[in-house]
Image: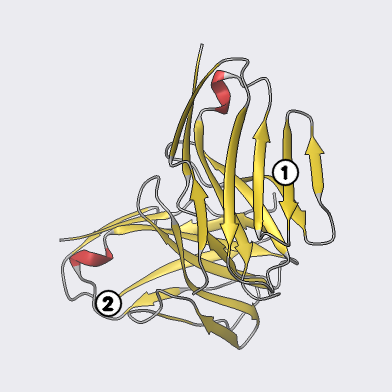
């Protein structure tokens, strides 16, 4: 299927710093881009999403930006806290449907 | 409470066995999905369904089948389990594009 590339694979930041995770996709028909957080042993939880008619979306400390021309989108977490430590996955819709292709994940560690 | 349920949560079986992983949701969603995920790794789409009697294959579908006879139920069947099937299987559902995940079934094939 179409690829979703995610970088970095691991990210370590100090509490209070910002964290940025970047994804690129290849399917020009993709129109929905969610981000999931998965804690150890838990199910993935949606933290924010963006649709192709919007360039940026923010929810408290979390923001997502989308550049459709360049086919990339990014997750920004400000004022990081230890409880933000988890694996984060980006995803892109397959064609303009509802199924998703996921990135390989970014393991984020926030140290006090 | 509206949720997505998966049974069993853990399963250890021998090679060659036929198994069915159950997924049910009380979210009232039309669309359901199966993913395979090794711990902390990428989610691979196996099958999906946009409604009753509608199923589609993902990239990892060749060794499994699904059925969608009822809106709330989407079972996944492995006809002959192999050690390479050892993984976690996650079921998800959505009303439109936002997917919600079940707790997963952790499968070990000996």
Residue on which the image places disc 2: B18
At 54% across and 83% down in the image, what residue appears? B56
Q: In front: B3, or B36?
A: B36
Where residue B74 appears, as percent x and y from the top left, is: 54, 73
Quadrant assignment, res B44: bottom left
Question: Which circle, 2 or 1, is nearer the viewer?
Answer: 1
Disc 2 secondary structure class? loop
Disc 1 secondary structure class? strand
Crowding at label 1, few (<14), some or many (≥20) Cα neighbours within 10 Å?
many
At 66% across and 51% down in the image, what residue appears? A73
Quadrant assignment, res B92: bottom right
At 52% across and 71% down in the image, what residue appears? A2
Where residue A33 appears, as percent x and y from the top left, is: 68, 57
The answer for which chain carries disc 1 is A
Q: CA distance from mark 2 to mark 1?
A: 43 Å
Residue on which the image places disc 1: A64
Is residue B27 at all visible to an observer of this figure? no
Where residue A88 appears, as percent x and y from the top left, is: 54, 42
At 36% across and 47% down in the image, what residue appears? B39
In this rendering, the count of numbered labels is: 2
Give the left or right position of residue A83, taking residue B77 as reference: right
The answer for which chain carries disc 2 is B
- Above/below status of A107 relative to B31: above
Q: In front: A103, or B101?
A: A103
Q: State the residue lying farthest toward the bottom.
A: B53
- Above/below status of B100 relative to B81: above
Give the left or right position of residue A86, taking residue A99 as reference: left
């Amino acid at each position: 299927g179409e690829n979703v590339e995610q970088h970095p694979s691991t990210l370590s930041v100090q509490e209070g710093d910002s964290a940025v995770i970047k994804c690129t996709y290849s399917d020009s028909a993709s129109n929905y881009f969610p981000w999931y957080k998965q804690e150890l042993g838990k199910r993935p939880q949606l933290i924010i999403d963006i649709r192709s008619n919007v360039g940026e979306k923010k929810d408290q400390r979390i923001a997502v930006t989308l550049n459709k021309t360049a086919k990339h989108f990014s997750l920004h977490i400000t004022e990081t806290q230890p409880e933000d430590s988890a694996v984060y996955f980006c995803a892109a819709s397959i064609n303009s449907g509802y199924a998703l292709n996921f990135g390989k994940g970014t393991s984020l560690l926030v140290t006090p | 409470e509206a949720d997505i349920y998966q049974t069993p949560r853990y399963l250890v079986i021998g090679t060659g066995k036929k198994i069915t992983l159950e997924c049910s949701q009380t979210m009232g969603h039309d669309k359901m999905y199966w993913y395979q995920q090794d711990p902390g790794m990428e989610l691979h789409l196996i099958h999906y369904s946009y409604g009753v009697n509608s199923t589609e294959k993902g990239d990892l579908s060749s060794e499994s089948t699904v059925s969608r006879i009822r809106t709330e139920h989407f079972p996944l069947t492995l006809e002959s389990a192999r050690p390479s099937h050892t993984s976690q299987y996650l079921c998800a559902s959505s009303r439109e594009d936002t997917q919600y995940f079940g707790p997963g079934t952790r499968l070990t094939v000996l």
